Each structure stands twice: as C-alpha cells, then as structure tokens.
Image (cartoon, rainbow, N blue to C red):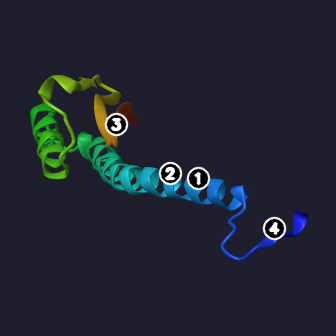
Amino acid sequence: MSWRRNQRGDVPIGCLVGFLVAVIVAVIAIKVVPVMVTVGEFDKEVKAMADRANRLEYTDKRIQKNLVGKAEELDIPINAKSIWIKRSSTRFKVRVTYDYPIEFPGYTYVWHKEHYEDRPLF
C-alpha cells in the first residue's frame, strides 16, 4: 500500500508548509519594506539638518519646521513635540522619537523609532 503515497495529485506536507511560510514572508515584506524606505529617507533628512546646524540661517525653529514638513510629506506621525533640539556653544544635538504603526492582517505592530544626531559646531 505504499505505492498510493506517490500518486499523481498528492502534495507532500513539506511543500504546503514551505508555501505557507513563503506567503507569510511575502505579506510581511510588502508591509514593512515601504515603511523602512520612508524611515530611511527621514533619517537622511535628520542627518542633513544636523550637518547644516552650524550655519547662521538654520535656527532651531527652522530645523524643527523642516523636519515636521518632511515627516508630513512622508506620512510619518511626528509633531513638534516629538523633536528635541539642544544647541550649546560647541555641540548640536537633535533627537526625534515617534511610534510608527504597521498594520498587518489581524494585527497592528507599533514600531518605536528614535533618530539621534550629535554634531560639533564650528
């Protein structure tokens, strides 16, 4: 009776499990990759603003306004209270913290993200 296991149309259970794992990974990737790209773009903007902080025209309010504008453009949930800026005579520090919800079918993952930059002022 072992010959019945190899009949046409018979799908090994390992193939079904592998297909199910591949579908789950694909669903996660479809939801997470765009979020990672937008967070990466915002991180570049935070670094650019931190690099420009030593210029006279880049005040703390202008940097905060630029970061909030970029976050709105990228649909990142940031407001002015999420941005912490400290400027001393020699250092510029900026910290942006927020929670980004990633919605999966039947579950919402809240990703806590923090961007921190510390630059010297010349």
Give the alpha-carbon distance from disc 4 to disc 2, as whole Å.
Answer: 31 Å
Which amino acid lies under the numbered mark 1 shown in the image of this protein? Val
Residue at the disc numbered 1: 21
Task: Determine contact: label 1, label 4, CB under 8 Å.
Answer: no
Q: Residue at x 39, y 57 (%)?
A: 30
Residue 60 pos. (x, y %):
15, 32
- Under tag 4, what secondary structure? helix
Q: Earlier in the sequence, mark 4 or mark 2?
A: 4
Q: Is residue 91 above or below residue 4?
A: above
Assess whether mark 1 and mark 2 are in contact (beta carbons under 8 angstroms).
Answer: yes
Checking the image for residue 42, the label placed there is none
C-alpha span from label 3 to label 1: 17 Å
Determine the secondary structure under disc 2: helix
Residue with the mark numbered 2:
24
Q: Which residue is mark 3?
A: 106
In the shown orientation, is residue 17 left or right of residue 75?
right
Badge 3 marks a residue whose secondary structure is loop
Residue nearest the observer in this picture, 6 or 98: 6
Q: What amino acid is found at the position of numbered circle 2 in the picture? A: Ile
Q: Earlier in the sequence, mark 3 or mark 2?
A: 2
> Which x, y percent locates residue 77?
19, 36
Circle 4 or circle 2, nearest the eye? 4
